Amino acid sequence: MPHDLVDAMANMREAEAMDLAQKMLDAGEDPLQVLDLCRQALEIVGKRFEAGKYFLPELIMAGEMLKKISQTAKPFMKKEPNPKTEVTGKVVIGSVKGDIHDIGKDIVTFMLDINGFEVHDLGVDVPAEKFVDAIKEVQPEVVGMSALLTTAFESMKNTVEVIKDAGLRDQVKIMVGGGAVDEKVRAYTGADAYGPDAVAAVKLSKKWIG
Ligand code: B1M
């Protein structure tokens, strides 16, 4: 049996999903756990979409539900327990060209922000040149690229290459993540590491900057 929240979201019962999420957060459940349940629900939605049982409206509605729940969860999120000293470093982040999914990227951005990083979010469908311009302007230690479409992995690889061609590759650590990104994709793109979730993204950035 799936969790009630997963069931409500996957079956588009928005009011019930919002209510369950709020109750879990008020009861002191880990907000990242709540968001992970939402991610599981969206995986089901994605599979139904793939199978032709759901269509774009369901995909859009599922995205909106998760956006609302992550807004509700934000005030409940805490810093990663850990360092003796506060890390301050700069991160430039964006969803790569061709990809407009941003829910996961926004969670990563928020987590980096509350953990003391100065985050420059370039948004979605970000061309490689925009990453290059931001690196020159912001001088970040870390560049983060998010993508959910498998077709956008090529775009990640191209962005890493364009950064290299601009002579900036040695200045930054590059982190990739989102949906199906794994170690194989990381190696293909030429990035330095991949983050399976938002907590991992914070840990990696701390490791590189600290
Ligand atoms: Co899209 N979509 N979608 N979609 N959508 C997927 C990704 C898909 C897997 C669904 C499916 O068919 N099973 C499929 C891709 C298939 C593939 O590539 N092989 C798909 C498709 C096909 C499409 C369209 C092409 C549909 C169409 O138009 N015919 C279209 C593409 C548009 C485009 O990008 N050019 C499209 C559009 C959309 C919506 C706009 C409707 C909406 C997005 C709304 C938005 O983002 N504002 C949407 C949604 C909601 C999804 C699903 C259902 C959910 C995605 C999501 O938000 N997950 C998705 C199905 C699925 O994921 N299984 C699907 C929750 C989120 C918290 O997880 O982003 O993985 P995630 O983030 C995690 C980690 O991965 C990590 O931290 C986060 C928190 O733990 N992380 C990072 C993320 N970024 C990171 C970066 C890091 C480190 C960690 O370092 C930099």
Image: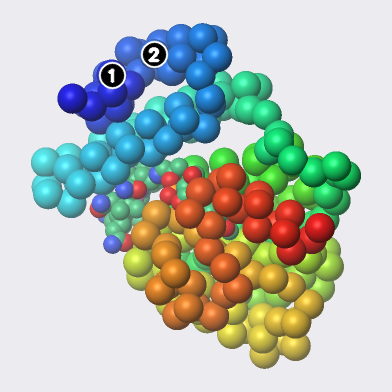
Q: Pointers 2 and 1 in contact (CB under 8 A)? A: yes
Q: Secondary structure at mark 1?
A: helix
Q: Quadrant of residue 73?
A: top right
Cα distance in 3D space between marks 2 and 1? 8 Å
Can I make out residue 126 in this image?
A: no
Nearer to the camera, 50 or 183: 183
Can I make out residue 84 in this image?
A: yes
Asked if disc 1 is less than 8 Å from ligand 1, the answer is: no
Q: Quadrant of residue 71?
A: top right
In-image side of 42 versus 22 (left or right): left
Q: Earlier in the sequence, mark 2 or mark 1?
A: 1
Residue 46's place in the image compared with 33, above or below, is: below
Dot 2 surroundings within 10 Å: few (below 14), some, or many (20 or more)?
some
Which residue is painted at 28% across and 19% down in the image?
A: 4
Name the residue beneath numbered marker 1: 4
Which residue is painted at 64% across and 46% down in the image?
A: 109
Q: Quadrant of residue 136?
A: bottom right
Which quarter of the image is occupied by the C terminus?
bottom right
Q: Secondary structure at mark 2?
A: helix
Position in image of residue 126 (x %, y %): 57, 64
Position in image of residue 27 (x %, y %): 51, 9
Residue 58's place in the image compared with 142, above or below, is: above
Which quarter of the image is occupied by the N terminus?
top left
Position in image of residue 61 (x %, y %): 33, 32
Dot 1 surroundings within 10 Å: few (below 14), some, or many (20 or more)?
some
Q: Could you tell me the amino acid type at mark 1? A: Asp
Q: Could you tell me the amino acid type at mark 2? A: Leu
Which residue is painted at 85% across and 42% down in the image?
A: 84
Name the residue beneath numbered marker 2: 20
